């Protein structure tokens, strides 16, 4: 049986750093969602784009 342990670490950041952290997280989530929308196919798993080179060179 595998056991996974996760340590929770609270970040101590200033208000300015907190704003930057939230902007970074929002941008990361936006990019992750754009990538998923481009690569994922709702019709067939064989149509999903899984080649990193093909995806990186795409212009969306």
Image (spheres, grey):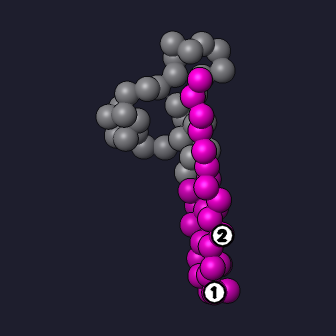
Q: Which residue is mark 1?
A: 14
| Crowd rating for badge 1 (residues with CA inside 10 Å; few <14, some 14–19, many 20+) | few
In magenta segment, residue 33? no
| Crowd rating for badge 2 (residues with CA inside 10 Å; few <14, some 14–19, many 20+) | few
Residue 15, above or below 52: below
The reply to whether residue 54 is in sight is yes
Query: Which residue in the rendered view is the most extreme toward the front?
Result: 1
The reply to whether residue 22 is in sight is no
Q: Position of residue 25 (x, y in %)?
A: 61, 62
Q: Which residue is mark 2?
A: 10
Q: Which residues are magenta?
A: 1-29
Q: Quadrant of the N terminus?
A: top right
- Closest to the camera, between mark 2 and mark 1, is 2
Which of the two residues, 50 or 2, is positioned nearer the viewer here? 2
* Dot 1: element: loop
Residue 48, above or below 37: above
């Amino acid at each position: 049986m595998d056991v996974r342990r996760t340590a929770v670490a609270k970040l101590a950041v200033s208000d300015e750093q907190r704003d930057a952290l939230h902007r970074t997280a929002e941008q990361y989530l936006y990019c992750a969602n754009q990538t998923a929308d481009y690569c994922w196919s709702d019709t067939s798993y064989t149509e999903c784009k899984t080649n990193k080179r093909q995806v990186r060179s795409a212009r969306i």
